[in-house]
Amino acid sequence: MLIFEWTVAVLFGAVILTALARRLGAPYPAFLALGGICLAFVPGVPNVRLDPELALALFLAPVLLDAGFDASLRDLRASWQPVFGLAVGAVVVTTLAVATVARIIVPDMPLSACIALGAIVAPPDAVAALAVLRHAPMPHRLATILRGESLLNDAASLLLYRLAVGAAVAGSFHAWEVAPGFALGVAGSVVAGPLLGIAFVAATRRITDPPTAIVLQFVAAFGLWLAAERVEMSGVLVVVTFAMMVARRAPGVTAPRARIVSYAVWDTAVFVINVLAFVLIGIQIDPILARLNGTDQWQAIILATAVFATVIVSRIVWVLPTSGLRGFGLGRHGDRSRLGAGVAVAWAGMRGIVTVATALALPEQFPHRDLVVFTAFFTVLGSLILQGLTLSPLLRLLKLPDDDPVGQEAGRARAAAYGAALESLEAGEACAATDALRAEFRSALSEAEAHEEGRAPESLPADAARRASILAARTKVLDMRRRGEIGDDAYFLLEEEFDWAELSATPRGDA
């Protein structure tokens, strides 16, 4: 009962912290990390320890599936060079740099443990960066690069992490013994993920009940991860490639009601997972410090500070010298914009859920586990506070140009969609209702034809009136319910009908 009560309290506190972060324009993971470390020193907090083998599956599988579903395969292809450079090159450089620093500061730490620490803190977290970008938008190309990096760098860092942890626990490592199975596992993961995605869409295409569809999505996320790990494939690659394939196949077969509800559920699930991960690692800080004596505490603080500085410097050193060559540039906007883009990408390297999850997943017998967990959390907290709270002002200072490619494409596609809708109405029978719709689409298409880029307006002419009339209808029915003229069952039925009618109107520009 105590754990349940603390969980409810933690979730309530997380909602308050997130609201505060949103008001300040800061990434909410930064406030979750601060809340987690404060909670560690509150008397009576239960010392919950998660099974290391469960940590990665519980925290990473759904987060990666959600991120993979939102990834744009076309945009990733267009930006493959900077994405690959960050996802692989920056991860390897950071891992080696951190391992070197750790070995110098803690000479008795095995090299494999040093490499594991480097792999833990190497991958940045796109969730934190994108939370900032809601308040200070980054050019679409750079946001795409960060999203792509966050998908692939998880795979690169976790592969290094698995090898290093295995070597640290076993006490030895021979590359020639694991290389064939390692390569086969990576190749098999890249093939298995898309094939399973095709099979999943085909098997679930007739499921229109939202709860059933959503439960199956979570079953797929956890089941694929567990199955991949069982057969020694990469859970990250299987889940990410599965999600990207489902995203390509599902739109034509998924029921609209299930899709709307699913998006809301997944947003909530990712938020709760972030909350639990930061709290679980936060409450371990006080016991860790208690187990370390005075000398070890100072060594932990020195190591954590040095690793944090190394993580930031190594990313800057990797990104800035060749930012123009790696494709961070913004087209025709010149060298200054390319340098500014490189600065923005270099500074958007906040660590988050992946670092937290991999630190929690370390086996109990891992050498210097407490030191590594403390350093990982310090790096996450430091990057979220220093970089997370300054990224938004930096973006405003840089004033990076953006040609708004998403808006351009959406405007042209909207015009084509309106045209197709009008053609279907022209082929139908004439009546007052269809005549009104024809007039709406003709008006929107006329505006698109007058636009220099052929972009249609975001709202149809009658959308404002449609929303106003639905509001009046809601108010009337609510008043009837209050007077007892209709019961709750009838009211909820009508409320759902009004919700769908309002959703049929295109979104307002300020929504």
Image (cartoon, grey):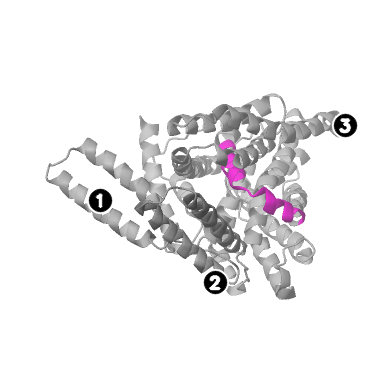
Q: What element carries label 1?
A: helix
Locate residue 23, reporting x and y percent: 42, 62
Q: Name the residue under label 3.
A: 176
In-front residue for pair 274/223: 223
Residue 204 figure quarter: top right
Q: Name the residue under label 1.
A: 474
- Amino acid type at mark 3: Trp
Q: Name the residue under label 2.
A: 450
In the figure, 470 relative to 215: above or below? below
Residue 415 figure quarter: bottom right
Q: Assign the N terminus to one quadrant of the image.
A: top left
Whole-angstrom CA distance, mark 2 to mark 3, is: 65 Å
Whole-angstrom CA distance, mark 2 to mark 1, is: 37 Å
Residue 458 seen by the camera? no
Q: Give the range drawn in magenta.
A: 61-81
- Amino acid type at mark 2: Ala
* Furthest residue toward front: 430
Q: Earlier in the sequence, mark 1 or mark 3?
A: 3
Residue 410 figure quarter: bottom right
Locate residue 364, reporting x and y percent: 62, 31
Q: Does the magenta stretch include residue 111?
A: no
